[in-house]
Amino acid sequence: MTSYGREGVENARFLLPTILGDVLRQWLTILLAGLIAAMSAFIWLSWSWQPEYSMTACYAIMSKATDGYVSYTTGSVSYTVATTFKYLIDSDILQAEVADAMGTDRLDGTIQTEILKDTNIMYLTVKASTPKKTYDIMSAVVENYQELVDAVLGSVTLDMLERPVIPTAPSNQPNRARTAATAGLLAMGLTAALLAFLSYSRDSVKTEEDFRIKLNLKRLATIPQERRRLSQGLDFRKQKHLLINQFPISYQFTEAVELLRTSFEYRAEKQSCKVILVTSTMPNEGKSTVSVNLALSLAKAGSRVIFIDGDLRNPTIHSMLKLDKVIRRDLGQFLQGQCGFPDVVVDYRNPEMYVLAGKASYENASELLGSRVMSLMIRELRTKADYIIIDTPPAGAMVDTEEVSHYADGAILVVRQNHAPTGAILDVVDALKQTKIQVLGCVFNNVQNWDWMSGRDYQPAAGQNEGHRR
């Protein structure tokens, strides 16, 4: 396979599931579009439908003879005469005669004829808005056609083979249910196609190749979207947070976190980084999950790790690590001088690392994170840990990250697949670089591809992660 072909296959593994995921997440929109279209079609059909009744009679076109009626026996002759007769029946002259016989200015109905090929058999069909009008038109045609035919063809008359039956129900009764269902399905299909097009055209990071083309940043790791296990049932509370030290968790997710740790250690050692902030461009990109799992993996590998929940506006780490009952005082209280440092440190022993977190929200978070107390605390912690991981608010929404960057050595940017606009990501990267902080790379998070969706193990390409070169 050519390089271009392999690249296309790799992009398809990420792009197609991403588009499909975007469409499926909008299932309610698609369903509503279908319901609205179905209801609209049903109402329009009920409002616009006009009942139509029809009567059909079968005639044989006969010639008049001195000894009675004789049919045309030659096929071509009978068909020619029958066709001529059809034109007379369908003519405006006859229809005007019928309307005049009914005492109206115009014929409130239609007259249709059909000749069986190469025969003298004709079907005469009359349609009108009521059974009575249909019967009256048919009777008027039978009463008035002979005078017109005699003037043109002479010895031709009709012999009725099948008498018409007065209709009791409309002949054009619509199938409202089928029409509504068709309209609904069509609307759902068009809506899904539109959503797929919008997903495809959205300027976001969809594939691993987008990092090279759009962002030009190191990709530390690709973390797959964790699929829900059947054993979890419908209780979403059973796995609200994804942690590598909690069950159930997939091998693919755990392996991706280990690859992230390997890549991070290589980059951090190369750039001499000890204090690392983890941020994202927008909320809900999974930065807290990534930062916590990175810290857990580092501690599991034997590193001394201190983890700090720097998102003082919306703290979540206490919930993720289930520390609600062991946290005595908030980190914010320590930064405000309301308690001592030992009161806010939690020894998390699975694996062993130290956590500084809190449960309260602080409106003056930027002021606290940029305070002298915070700076002195980080300076002291540098001597006691191999790595200090700080989970910060989204850099694209808050200025808190900028305050933390003053005493951090490096930064990791979490990029969720097909979430934040590329332009916004680049703005965050530029803002981080302006603070003179080392951007170690990005984590491609919550990624869908065909391998993970099908249950096969995902194996990164050789050299995909920087840490593999160690």
Image (tube, rainbow, N blue to C red):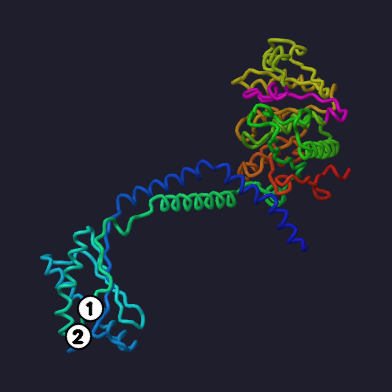
- The disc labelled 2 sits on which kind of residue? Gly
- Circle 2: element type: strand
Label 1 or label 2, whichever comes before in sequence order: 2
Residue 175 among those drawn in magenta: no
Against 210, residue 238 (above or below) is above
Against 282, residue 363 (above or below) is above
Furthest-front residue in view?
67
- Find the magenta span and give its range: 298-321
- Circle 1: element type: strand
Q: Is residue 158 visible?
A: yes
Quarter of the picture holding the N terminus:
bottom right
Name the residue nearer the viewer: 364 or 74: 74
Q: What residue sits 73% from the left and 33% below the top? A: 290
Which label sits in the foreground, 1 or 2? 2
Asked if the residue at tag 2 contacts the one at tag 1, i.e. Cβ–Cβ closer than 8 Å, the answer is no
Could you say where residue 133 lies in the image, as x and y percent from the top left?
19, 61
Look at mark 1 in the image and give the residue it sits on: 158
Name the residue nearer the viewer: 414 or 163: 163
- The disc labelled 1 sits on which kind of residue? Leu
Query: Can you tell which quarter of the image residue 92 is in?
Result: bottom left
Look at mark 2 in the image and give the residue it sits on: 68
Query: Can you tell which quarter of the image residue 397 is in?
Result: top right
Distance in Å between CA atoms under marks 1 and 2: 13 Å
Left or right: residue 216 compared with residue 68: right
Against 425, residue 82 (above or below) is below
